[in-house]
Amino acid sequence: MATASFTATGMTCQHCVGSVTQEVSELAHVTSVSVDLPSGTVTVESDASIPQDEIIAAIDKEGYPAVASK
């Protein structure tokens, strides 16, 4: 199992959280998505490695610029 964290900006409500969660969950191999609204942290767990740019693109698609957390 792999875990990766990202920071997304611009999320302000639970609708934002739901949109990001749904979009990222649709990626192959994703097993869970957790979003912390106050910090903008998106944590993705998967059963295989997923390129970070694919996850970032899914978050960006919903309108929230994202970067990989360090």
Image (cartoon, grey):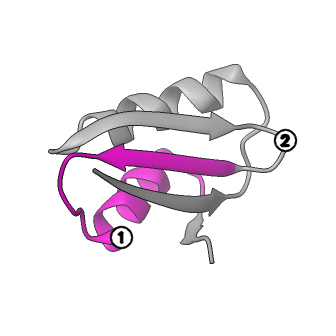
Mark 1 element type: helix
Q: In which quarter of the image is the C terminus?
A: bottom right
Q: Is 61 situated left or right of 1 in this image?
A: right
What is the magenta range?
A: 41-64
Which of the 4 image quadrants contains residue 50? Answer: bottom left
> Does the segment drawn in magenta span residue 62?
yes
Is 37 on the left-hand or right-hand side of 31? right
Residue 5 in percent (x, y) is at: 54, 59
Labels in figure, total: 2
Question: Which residue: 17% across, 55% down?
Answer: 48
* Residue reaching furthest to the front: 1
Give the labeled residue for mark 2: 38
Above/below status of 21 relative to 45: above
- Magenta highlight on residue 67: no
- The x and y percentages for residue 58 are 37, 52
Residue 11: name its quadrant. top right
Tag of residue 52: 1
Q: In this view of the protein, which residue sits in the foreground, 57 or 2?
A: 2
Where residue 33 sits in the image (x, y, percent)?
45, 36
Q: Which of 60 and 25 is in front in this view?
A: 25
Judging from the image, what secondary structure is the residue with disc 2 in? loop
Q: What is the three-letter code of the residue carrying label 2?
A: Pro
Horizontal and vertical percent position of residue 47: 20, 46
